[in-house]
């Protein structure tokens, strides 16, 4: 590694997964607070570091975890806002190269421009990312007491991007998207007629966050064309920002497509050899068509020209300095020479650090045993070795770097008290049941330990995947109460099922069991009755140490098994620990601990392929399950790839979903899973009928245009949402059969949010900052005292009748000026209005 590197980069944990973001401020590299990840300012430049275990997801939720027994894949992106200065963009590019050198020259480099971000970059932000106006150069301060109303554009079919608009004007709105008007008192969600479901749901999440940030009173949904039908108070506020008499809306076509996706129709691959072996640098065309890994030579550099789909520059480990530099320059020259679009991507990769997208250009790819970035691949990548280190509180507090690296404050042996939410109250969980959770419930855990003679506390509140929102709110509230009882000393940690931090798992010493069901005050359906451990069940065990192991209940059937992992089967007569062929010894040991909890110590160990009749009887009979060789020998095989397909524009297009998971299967889409041995077409229940009908034709076109000359007879399987076979689900890790059943529709989300809105009790005279008391139509007190709203003038706000009195009448009846009245608390205002008779 280079000895000279920016101090900001020294925070990168070696040999670990990590996701880090820096911003260029005053030409310096400054870390972005983790709470701000996903927020970008269009006047700035950023550097994003993403390191993950090969084939695993990476993004804003990625924790720093040491990787053993497999390779680390590192990507560096520098993102340039539309308004960033040339100097800042230059610093971002220069520092990216410096970081690349520091990491041994192995990361994959990407240049990202606002509005044309790559699928990989967008994939880091599963809930979308926000582009705000301003930046460091303009003196923007993230923390400000001065609230400024803002207009946000929400656009995208999969991971909508939220972009702040230059001003609050009708000219920025269009019928195809959703917009958020954020005022001080009310957050409006304006919905275009043809906006998609994901845009609506994303806007609802963002609006909730904005409301909570500055204490707005309400979230108001405004459907295109229904602006005039808003309640008088809300209509007046909306009109103060967007004058209804000036309303003009662009069409959806003028707004452009929701996603800029890759056209799969591509030119054939051409491989160029870049070498200066004979003393003269030259570029020679080697071959066209399908490529073999053996075509590459570590002594030189190569260019793979894939037409408008992009070019790749592959740098051999022993390539000369000139070959390294000139190959990249030549690739840029191809764009002009061959007439490719200016936006044609060029990606530089290093021998041994190739990403999946590059390897898929070859008919086959064999991994090598070599150092990649900050990690090292082991020749037996499935054989994990657990290193037991002293992780007591004293050691970790004296060595903060170790604590940060392990994400542990101690070894989890402190005292804990566990409560389960039931009927909006906390009921204490007996110690013998600690570590047993139900996905339909929420929990509060108080953990205490001692360090340096001082008592320290952590309050976790754990939210089950299927726990209702009211119980989740109760857990959060009770956590605050426990915090107050301890004088504010504890650290509060919000934990969502499946995202448990290392220390949370360490508290239960590798014996965390998550069952279906729960008390569920608002839980409906078959699992509502399950508030205790079932008599029979199947647990999917993931993890190889006390601080990373959890067991999750899955459907009790053979189809739930997976050759990669270990399962605990509690049958009516016997308990089994079933060990898949790809499971490691450490994973088996952790599963045994789970089985001891599940069966009180009595269980039988069963290895895949050696099962006896009693096992199949207890699990309900034999079925096919995920046992593809790719799952058990991933180090030697190319991973599966997932694409979202669309023929909406008349041209076949596909967007790759990088580091995919089950939640990436969106109900409105047709998806293609390419496992190399087969193509799976997944038809979402709300996908377009025309795209469903063309699904097979689409898959054939995908095979035909694959530059690696795929077998045209590759099997194509159509599967419908809710009927996925194990050969499909096995590529998605733990599969949740109820994932979509528990997804709320936009209409349900909207109804819940509208039900939570209080009756507006705000000073509308100051809304928008451009209206005064005198701007409202005036009527006599006798007219305003009418208690029947239908008999009041149409332009009277029934909640704020006082605004419609003349200045003289207001002073006469309220015995004060309106300015004095507006400064009173709401309850005093209401009492005075009752006295006057207009409440």
Image (cartoon, grey):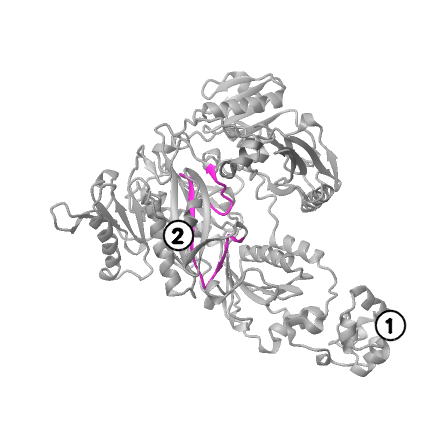
The structure residue drawn at horizontal position 54% and vertical position 24%, both measured from the top left corner, is 591
Circles 2 and 1 in contact, beta carbons < 8 Å: no
Badge 1: how crowded within 10 Å, few (<14), some, or many (20+)? some
The structure residue drawn at horizontal position 61% and vertical position 76%, both measured from the top left corner, is 243
Instruction: Quadrant for residue 527, please give it.
Output: top right
User: Of discs 2 and 1, which sits in the foreground?
Assistant: 2
- In the picture as drawn, the residue positioned furthest to the front comes out as 453
Indicate the quadrant containing the C terminus: top left, top right, bottom left or bottom right.
bottom right
Frontmost residue, 177 versus 151: 151
The structure residue drawn at horizontal position 87% and vertical position 72%, both measured from the top left corner, is 837
590, above or below 300, in the image: above
Indicate the quadrant containing the N terminus: top left, top right, bottom left or bottom right.
top left
If you read the primary sequence from the N terminus, does the residue marked by circle 2 or circle 1 appear first? 2
Instruction: Quadrant for residue 800, please give it.
Output: bottom right
- For disc 2, the marked residue is 77
Marks counted in the figure total 2
244, above or below 627, in the image: below
Q: Is residue 270 visible?
A: no
Frontmost residue, 515 versus 254: 515
- In the picture as drawn, the residue positioned furthest to the bottom comes out as 808
Q: Give yes or no for residue 49 being in the magenta stretch.
A: yes
Frontmost residue, 766 versus 638: 766
Identify the secondary structure beneath mark 2. strand
Please provide percent x and percent y for residue 385.
44, 26
Badge 2: how crowded within 10 Å, few (<14), some, or many (20+)? many
Q: Give yes or no for residue 13 being in the magenta stretch.
A: no
Instruction: Quadrant for residue 147, please give it.
Output: bottom right
Task: Give the residues in magenta.
Answer: 36-65
- For disc 1, the marked residue is 837
């Amino acid at each position: 590694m280079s000895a000279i590197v920016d101090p900001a980069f020294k925070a990168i944990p070696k040999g670990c997964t990590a996701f880090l973001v820096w911003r260029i401020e005053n030409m310096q590299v400054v870390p972005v607070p983790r709470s701000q990840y996903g927020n970008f300012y269009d006047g700035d430049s950023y550097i994003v570091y993403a390191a993950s275990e090969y084939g695993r997801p990476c993004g804003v939720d990625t924790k720093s975890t040491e990787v053993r027994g497999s390779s680390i894949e590192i990507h560096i992106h520098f993102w340039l806002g539309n308004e960033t200065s040339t100097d800042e963009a230059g610093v971002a590019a220069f520092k990216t190269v410096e970081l690349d050198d520091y990491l041994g020259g192995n990361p994959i480099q990407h240049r990202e421009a606002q509005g044309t971000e790559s699928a990989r970059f967008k994939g880091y932000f599963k809930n979308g990312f926000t582009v705000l106006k301003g930046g460091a150069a303009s003196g923007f301060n993230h923390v400000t007491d001065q609230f400024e109303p803002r207009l946000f554009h929400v656009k995208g079919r999969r991971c909508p991007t939220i972009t702040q608009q230059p001003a609050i004007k009708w000219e920025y709105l269009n019928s195809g998207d959703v917009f958020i008007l954020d005022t001080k008192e009310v957050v409006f969600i304006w919905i275009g007629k043809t906006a998609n479901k994901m845009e609506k749901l994303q806007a609802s999440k963002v609006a909730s966050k904005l409301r909570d940030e500055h204490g707005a009173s309400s979230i108001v949904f405004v459907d295109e064309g229904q602006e005039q039908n808003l309640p008088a108070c809300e209509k007046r506020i909306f009109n103060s920002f967007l004058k209804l008499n000036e309303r003009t809306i662009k069409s959806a076509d003028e707004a452009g497509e929701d996603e800029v996706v890759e056209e799969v129709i591509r030119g054939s691959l051409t491989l160029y050899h870049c070498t200066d072996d004979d003393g003269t640098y030259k570029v020679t065309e080697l071959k066209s068509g399908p490529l073999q890994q053996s075509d590459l030579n570590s002594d030189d550099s190569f260019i793979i020209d894939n037409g408008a789909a992009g070019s790749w520059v592959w740098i051999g480990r022993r390539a000369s300095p000139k070959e390294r530099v000139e190959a990249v320059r030549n690739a840029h020259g191809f764009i002009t020479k061959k007439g490719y679009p200016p936006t044609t991507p060029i990606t530089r990769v290093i021998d041994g650090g190739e990403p999946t997208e590059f390897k898929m250009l070859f008919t086959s790819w064999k991994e090598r045993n070599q150092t990649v970035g900050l990690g090292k691949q082991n020749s037996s990548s499935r054989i994990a070795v657990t290193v037991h280190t002293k992780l007591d509180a004293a050691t970790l507090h004296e060595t903060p770097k170790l604590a940060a690296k392990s994400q542990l404050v101690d070894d989890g042996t402190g005292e804990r008290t566990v409560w389960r939410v039931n009927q909006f109250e906390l009921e204490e969980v007996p110690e013998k049941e600690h570590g047993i959770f139900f996905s339909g419930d929420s929990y509060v855990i108080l953990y205490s330990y001692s360090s340096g003679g001082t008592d320290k506390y952590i309050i976790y509140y754990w939210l089950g995947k299927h726990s209702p929102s009211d119980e989740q709110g109760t857990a959060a509230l009770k956590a605050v109460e426990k915090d107050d009882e301890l004088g504010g000393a504890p650290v509060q940690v919000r934990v969502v099922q499946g995202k448990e931090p290392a220390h949370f798992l360490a508290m239960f010493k590798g014996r965390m069991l998550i069952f279906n069901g729960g008390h569920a005050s608002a839980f409906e359906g078959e699992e509502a009755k399950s508030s205790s451990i079932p008599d029979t069940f199947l647990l999917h065990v993931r993890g190889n140490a006390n601080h990373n192991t959890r067991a999750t209940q899955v459907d009790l059937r053979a189809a739930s098994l997976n050759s990669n992992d270990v399962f605990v089967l509690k049958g009516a007569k016997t308990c089994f620990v079933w060990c898949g062929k790809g499971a490691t010894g450490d994973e088996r040991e952790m599963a045994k601990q789970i089985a001891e909890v599940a069966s009180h110590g009595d269980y039988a160990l069963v290895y895949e392929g050696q099962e006896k009749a009693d096992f199949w009887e207890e699990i309900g009979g034999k079925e096919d399950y995920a046992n593809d060789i790719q799952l058990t020998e991933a180090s030697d095989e190319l991973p599966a790839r997932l694409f979202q397909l669309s023929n909406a524009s008349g041209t076949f297009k596909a967007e790759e979903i990088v580091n995919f998971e089950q939640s990436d299967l969106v109900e409105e889409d047709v998806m293609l899973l390419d496992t190399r041995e087969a193509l799976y077409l997944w038809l979402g229940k709300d996908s377009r009928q025309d795209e469903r009908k063309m699904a097979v034709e689409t898959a054939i076109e995908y095979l035909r245009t694959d530059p690696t000359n795929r077998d045209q007879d590759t099997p194509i399987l159509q599967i419908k949402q809710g009927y996925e076979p194990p050969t499909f689900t096995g590529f998605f890790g733990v599969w949740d059969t109820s994932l979509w059943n528990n997804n709320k529709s936009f209409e349900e989300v909207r109804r819940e949010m509208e039900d939570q809105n209080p009756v507006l009790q705000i000073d509308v005279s100051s809304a928008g900052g451009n209206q005064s008391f005198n701007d409202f139509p005036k009527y006599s007190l006798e007219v305003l005292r009418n208690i029947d709203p239908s008999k009041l003038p149409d332009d009277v706000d029934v909640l704020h009748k006082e605004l419609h009195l003349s200045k003289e009448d207001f002073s006469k009846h309220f015995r004060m000026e309106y300015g004095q009245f507006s400064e009173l608390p709401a309850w005093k205002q209401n009492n005075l209005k009752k006295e006057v008779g207009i409440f």
